[in-house]
Amino acid sequence: MKDVLLITIDSLRADHVGCFGYDRDTTPVIDEFAADGHTFERTFAHACSTRPSFPSIMSSSHALMHGGFEMMTEGRTMVAEVFDDGGYQTAGFHSNLYLSADFGYDRGFDFFYDSKTDPGTTARIRQFVKDRLDQDGLLYKLLASAFDTAERTAGINVGSAYDTATEITDNALEWVETADEGGPRFLWVHYMDVHHPYVPPAEYQREFRDDPISENRSIKLRRKMIEEPENVTDSELEEIVDLYDAEIKYTDAEIGRLIEEVTEAWGEEPVTAITADHGEEFLDHGQFSHYTHFYDEVMQVPLFLGGIEGSGRYDELVGLQDVPATLVDYAGLEVPDAFQGWSVRPIVEGGDWPRTHVIGDWSDRQGENRFGYRDEEWKFVRRDSGEELYDLEADPDENRNVIDDHPEVAERLGETIDDHVRAIDETGSDLVEVEMDEDVKARLRDLGYKE
């Protein structure tokens, strides 16, 4: 059995990766990794943001199945559980609280770091205020308002919403050094830096601009892009993209350090997958960040596979549900029947590939459901406000809704969505509500999530 390393990057859109054709040198490490390994050029998430996307990465299942993405219920088979049952030592490292143990993401891990118990100095000060003051009292409300106002108007980042890539890598490598010799080992590392707020180190900003943008300026830009996207100027957009690209290059360097030291410590390169949970919007459709849209700037993600024989680039349609199945397969374990994805081994070895489309789903707590369908030719979106259809060959940027021109296509793809909804109902269970403490809610708001 082979050691396995899964690296996920939050908010990394595929077209900002060098080997996917980007004109900036954002990903030299990943580009070299891709050249030596296997690149899947048309990989898509099954959802448009972290919470509904990660069930596919960690359990090869759709977001709305098994009670929804609020909690990883027992109906899902977590990839770490497969490795654990197969005799692997397992560890996971991340700092996105929606992927914390509270939501069931620790299942199958011998060691699990989610940063919940280590929120950082400023966040601890904020928690100290909450612990010591009556939250209904005037003083508490004044101080809480001051935190928010400081970030909005002065650009003061009051408490880190996530651990930096350096910290995550350091923590993961500490476990790598202490893991039992001989393996086998499964390690998952998730990097948050490419997610806003973009506050990359100055040295990485200088790769793309003469003068680094201050942290205060970065935080104010973040506020404006989230709260007033229509008022972001062209020059401000350039600054935001510079910051985003600098975060990518910083994360890329830390990924290089991680892979190099893991390989050295374990004696050989593990089977390694590098991917992202979703992309990011930069006014492609009028917004920033990654809202509940199913456009390709959010849905298309990079996927690379290394530590196996050969190299190549492939244009078959792949979904993130195929990632856990692939890792389990190449580790020499049996892929669970509960997994809805397929191992990409047939693509690599020139065999038949069964996937013809990717379906995404999402819902809110008010009962609205949204669905997206994508194949090689069409994108179909269903939401409460109506349906959309895009001809991806004629309109790859998805600017013209042609549903009135092709009602027969919309009907056919709508029937596929109907089948998907029935499959969701068949796995249905009572929705699990997770109670979050106020500090967790505050840190999630710092990342732009709405409760």
Image (cartoon, rainbow, N blue to C red):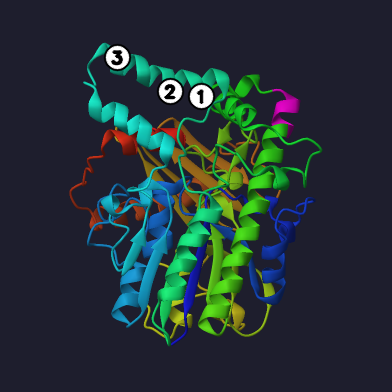
Q: Does the magenta run of residues contain 234?
A: yes
* Quadrant of res 383: top left
x, y (%) of residue 397? Answer: 68, 42
In the rendered structure, find residue 139 and report the number of the disc placed on it.
Answer: 3
Q: What element carries label 2?
A: helix
Could you tell me which secondary element the residue under label 1 belongs to? helix
- Residue 280 image offset from top left, x and y in percent: 58, 43
Can see residue 417?
yes
Residue lying at 73% horizontally and 57% vertically, measured from the top left: 18
Which numbered disc, 1 or 3, marks the residue closer to the eye? Answer: 3
Q: Quadrant of residue 402?
A: top right
The residue labelled by disc 1 is 151
Tell me residue 447's x, y (percent): 46, 37
Report the span colored magenta: 233-238
Query: Mark 1 is on which residue type?
Result: Glu
Total numbered labels: 3
For the C terminus, which image quadrant? top left
Say which amino acid is labelled 2: Phe
Pick the quarter of the image with the N terminus: bottom left
Instruction: Say whether marks 2 and 1 touch (CB < 8 Å).
Output: yes
Q: Which of marks 1 and 3 is nearer the N terminus?
A: 3
Q: Is residue 156 above or below residue 174?
A: above
Give yes or no for residue 187 being in the magenta stretch. Answer: no
Residue at image mark 2: 147
Q: What residue type is labelled 3?
A: Leu
Q: In the figure, is residue 233 to the left or right of 370?
A: right
Seen from the viewer's position, the closer of residues 125 and 231 is: 125
The location of residue 9, given as percent across then percent down, is 54, 55
Residue 325 appears anywhere in the view: no
Marks 1 and 3, how far apart at CA: 19 Å
Disc 1 + disc 3, Cβ < 8 Å: no
Cα–Cα span, label 2 and label 1: 7 Å
